[in-house]
């Protein structure tokens, strides 16, 4: 198991980076106290000398209860005051660290000062900036054109060239009709039945044999790896060893049966039946190109009725350039327009009438 020599700092004189092999400060001679912080420098080295390996493999140091001196595990009496080691004599703590968690600084490390935050300006390549500028300009241009088209209008003078109208009255008759459905409604009289496809259901038709690759991870053993460091409490660190399973991917071809389905038609009874209903029989219409308006005349039989009436009224215009316009109006609005009259009008960018003002 690999061993590494640690460092420690003297809290009495401020000396730093003292090698773990020394139990007293190389500067002031004071013993390292209980609870001293052992650490590994960034340039940690592997212990290979037999003498150092013997020190590293020893148990944790013990602390003299009389003079607080730190002593090696093999010493039975204090190296400073010669007091014997007792059963309850405390020892330096043994600590375990995960990978990259072992301390890199000692007790005398200067507190880290957070760097002053200097905002960095993000520099965009000139080509990107130019492309963004062109794209933005095009978008603004398109938006401007849309707004321009939406709000731009023109004033024109229109002349009435004619008026027209149409009125219609639908005539409905109460007839016997033949219809069909999956059920006979109330009042219907069955005529005939037949079996028709109502819907489809998926039904298993057969199986197809196919091949697919199946892979799985199988454990083939275990491996030992370094998973951290262990502070032995004597100035040295050892690599902490862990075990983990080792897997190998194993693949094989296997055959399986893949179901194949077909759409099976489901039949139900379709009913043809007779029933009496109001149906459109004809439409009576009247139209003209003057303002003499009337409703069409019609005669109703005993089994007939008039439906909801409809009417439409339009006026034709022409502008000084000969362009023809046609506009629909309500009846009361339509009456205000006479042939050959001139009217002020507003036309939008697309040539549609937006406003017409009747005037003499």
Image (tube, helix red, strand yellow):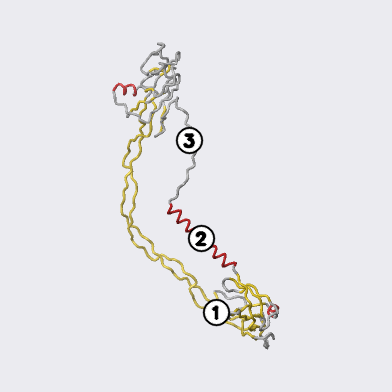
Position above or below: 66 against 340? above
Q: Which residue is mark 3?
A: 115
Residue found farthest to the top: 82
Which circle marks residue 139 in the picture? 2
- Secondary structure at badge 2 equals helix
Looking at the figure, which quarter contains the C terminus?
Answer: bottom right
Q: Quadrant for residue 33, please give it.
A: top left
Picture residue at 52% right of the left edge, 62% below the top: 141
Packing grade of label 3 (10 A; few <14, some 14-19, many >=20) is few
Looking at the figure, which quarter contains the N terminus?
Answer: top left
Dot placed on the residue nearer the N-terminal end, 2 or 3: 3
Q: Where's residue 84, x and y in %?
A: 40, 12
- Secondary structure at badge 1 equals strand
Q: Which residue is mark 1?
A: 272
Q: CA distance from mark 1 to mark 3?
A: 89 Å
- Secondary structure at badge 3 equals loop
Q: Quadrant for residue 357, please give it.
A: bottom right
Q: Where's residue 348, x and y in %?
A: 59, 71
Which circle marks residue 178 in the picture? none
Packing grade of label 1 (10 A; few <14, some 14-19, many >=20) is some
Disc 2 or disc 1, which is closer to the eye?
Answer: 2
């Amino acid at each position: 198991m690999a061993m590494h020599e640690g460092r420690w700092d003297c809290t009495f004189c401020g000396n730093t980076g003292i090698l773990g092999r020394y139990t007293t400060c190389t500067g002031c001679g004071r013993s390292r106290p209980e609870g001293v912080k052992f650490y590994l420098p960034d340039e940690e080295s592997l212990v290979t000398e037999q003498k150092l390996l013997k020190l590293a493999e020893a148990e944790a140091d013990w602390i003299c209860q009389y003079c607080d001196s730190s002593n090696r595990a093999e010493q039975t009496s204090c190296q400073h005051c010669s007091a014997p080691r007792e059963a309850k004599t405390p020892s330096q703590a043994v600590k375990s660290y995960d990978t990259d968690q072992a301390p890199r600084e000692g007790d005398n490390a200067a507190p880290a000062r957070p760097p002053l935050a200097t905002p960095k300006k993000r520099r965009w390549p000139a080509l990107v900036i130019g492309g963004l500028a062109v794209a933005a300009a095009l978008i603004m241009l398109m938006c401007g054109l849309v707004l321009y088209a939406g709000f731009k209008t023109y004033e024109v003078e229109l002349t009435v060239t004619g008026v027209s109208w149409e009125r219609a009255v639908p005539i409905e008759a109460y007839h016997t009709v033949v219809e069909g459905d999956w059920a006979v409604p109330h009042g219907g009289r069955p005529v005939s039945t037949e079996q028709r496809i109502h819907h489809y259901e998926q039904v298993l038709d057969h199986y197809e044999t196919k091949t697919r690759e199946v892979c799985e991870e199988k454990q083939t053993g275990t491996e030992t790896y370094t998973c951290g460091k262990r502070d032995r409490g004597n100035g040295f660190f050892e690599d902490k060893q862990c075990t983990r399973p080792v897997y190998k991917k194993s693949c094989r071809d296997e055959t399986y049966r893949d179901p194949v389905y077909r759409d099976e038609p489901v039949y139900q009874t379709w009913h043809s039946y007779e029933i009496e209903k109001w149906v459109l029989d004809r439409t009576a219409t009247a139209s003209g190109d003057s303002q003499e308006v009337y409703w069409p005349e019609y005669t109703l039989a005993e089994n007939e009725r008039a439906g909801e009436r409809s009417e439409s009224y339009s006026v034709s215009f022409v502008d000084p350039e000969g362009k023809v316009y046609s506009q629909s109006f309500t009846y009361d609005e339509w009456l205000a327009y006479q042939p050959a009259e001139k009217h002020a009008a507003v036309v939008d960018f697309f040539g549609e009438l937006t406003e017409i003002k009747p005037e003499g």
